[in-house]
Amino acid sequence: MKEYTRAQLALRNGQDREEIWCAYQGIIYDVSPSRLWRNGKHYEHWAGQDLTPELSDAPHTSRVFERFKVVGKLIQA
């Protein structure tokens, strides 16, 4: 699985590049196909970052990530 740093993930925020990616529990997902992530924002959440600590505020469970393609692993660098 390809590995990405937080800085690389941050570039996939829907603003700097076309890709809209989010990380959850160390796995990076491509949420670009979702109409709910237009322009890299989903309600008060922003793409290009690790959303693990924010999921407790969401009205859904982590199963929501099952519908998105995994693009890599988030590493500490």
Image (cartoon, helix red, strand yellow):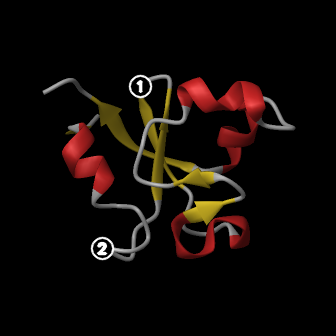
Q: Is residue 64 above or below residue 14?
A: above
Residue for badge 2: 16
Residue for badge 1: 26
Label 1 and label 2: CA atoms lie apart by 22 Å
Residue 62 lies left or right of residue 70; in this view the side is right
Q: Please name the amino acid that badge 2 sits on.
A: Asp
User: Please, what secondary structure does the residue beneath circle 1 have?
Assistant: loop
Mark 2: few, some, or many residues within 10 Å (few <14, many ≥20)? few
Q: Where is residue 7 shown, x and y percent of the image?
A: 20, 46
User: Please, what secondary structure does the residue beneath circle 2 have?
Assistant: loop
Residue 49 lies left or right of residue 33; in this view the side is left
Tell me where residue 55 sits by quadrant. top right
Choose the circle earlier in sequence order: 1 or 2: 2
Q: Where is residue 12 shown, x and y percent of the image?
A: 35, 61
Q: Where is residue 1 shown, x and y percent of the image?
A: 29, 34
Q: Please name the amino acid that badge 1 sits on.
A: Gly
Query: Residue at the spot x=74%, y=41% of the render?
Result: 64
